[in-house]
Amino acid sequence: MKTTALTETHVALGAKMVPFAGYQMPVSYEGVNIEHETVRNHLGVFDVSHMGEFLIEGPHALDLVQKVTSNDAAKLTVGKAQYSCLPNENGGIVDDLIVYRIKDETYLLVVNASNIEKDWEHISRYNQNIGAELRNISDDYSLLAIQGPKAVEAMQSLSSHDLSAIRFYNFIVGDFAGVAHVIISATGYTGSGGFEIYCKNSEVQQIWDKVLEAGKDQGIKPIGLAARDTLRLEMGYCLYGNDIDDTTSPFEAGLGWITKLTKDFVNSEALKIEKEKGPKRKLVGFELTGKGIPRQGYPILSDKGDEIGKVTSGTMSPSLGKGIGLGYVPTAFADVGTQIQIQIRKNRVPATIVKPPFYKST
């Protein structure tokens, strides 16, 4: 089981540690609801150093990124990032990821921890005919997510750069918390704003300590992976392995907006045909109108009681106080307002198809 550079720090803070994607990771410190509310209303810091990082460099770097990713990386200028996915050859998704353009011929791909080896093999296979410089730097770098509406106010004292000027899905390489060169990225998986900080393992303890000190007046707390999951689900963000996988297409998953068929990429011709015909099923959001908590794998039923799908992600929303979830249903049942039922043990709980995000900040 791998550990991050901050594992001993999490244990000392009283975190409950669990195995996750091959790592020992903090799932919670005080409890998921408290930590969730902290991020929504104040400020939290996550250690997400288990995520993978690949560097693609050289004159053929863009060629490789364009071939393996679905979004159009040619539109990225230095200092910009984009959400994308790695399509496979069979209509599914190898992984979802973020692509950063660091320099003219340097791209950083940030991938899911559980898929690092699979993604590396997939990208390397296509690179055999392209010849970009490809490096897996996952084990050398740490990643902190500083998330919440107080992020700019709390963290400004740690950098000489104007953090409020970094727009969503933009980043800078600059000084932060006494470290000269880190990536400060206005990205995140919570829907409450903030930054993600990429740094070397040797630098992350200093940054962690200074972040907690700088955020004291704004109520900053360390946050575990359990709250990260409830936060992302309230926004309707996909989780790889639950809502998307090797068998789900980008169009089924509602990711047509990151699937740019104006360029040639892995399986793009087949995806063009799927788009023209329309997917047979769609990933939808739903809210329970009765009592219960939907969980992954629970059957989704039509209002007549026929099984039409399964829940891919579900929880009791801490912000809304009701059960929410995602799942795939046939396209005929995917319209907003459609009445469905969720089989929760012996009970059939009524629910309504809604358009995510479930949580909308005021």
Image (cartoon, rainbow, N blue to C red):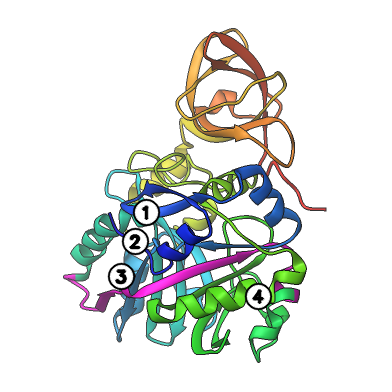
Please state which amino acid type lies under the numbered disc 4: Glu
1 and 2 marks in contact (CB < 8 Å) = yes
- The numbered mark at residue 139 is 3
Please state which amino acid type lies under the numbered disc 3: Asp
1 and 4 marks in contact (CB < 8 Å) = no
Please state which amino acid type lies under the numbered disc 2: Thr
- The numbered mark at residue 24 is 1
> What is the crowding at mark 4: few (fewer than 14 residues within 10 Å), some, or many (at least 20)?
few
Residue 93 percent coordinates (x, y): 36, 48
Disc 1 is placed on an element classified as strand
Q: Earlier in the sequence, mark 3 or mark 2?
A: 2
Q: Residue at x 47, y 55 (%)?
A: 259
| Residue farthest to the right, as pictured | 362
Disc 4 is placed on an element classified as helix
Task: Compute the Cα span from label 3 to label 1.
Answer: 14 Å
Residue 231 percent coordinates (x, y): 62, 48
Q: Residue at x 32, y 65 (%)?
A: 67
The residue indicated by pointer 4 is 213
Q: Does 55 appear above or below 320?
A: below
Q: Earlier in the sequence, mark 1 or mark 2?
A: 2
> What is the crowding at mark 2: few (fewer than 14 residues within 10 Å), some, or many (at least 20)?
some
Magenta part of the chain: 128-153
Horizontally, residue 42 falls left or right of residue 28, namely right
Task: Compute the Cα span from label 1 to label 2.
Answer: 5 Å
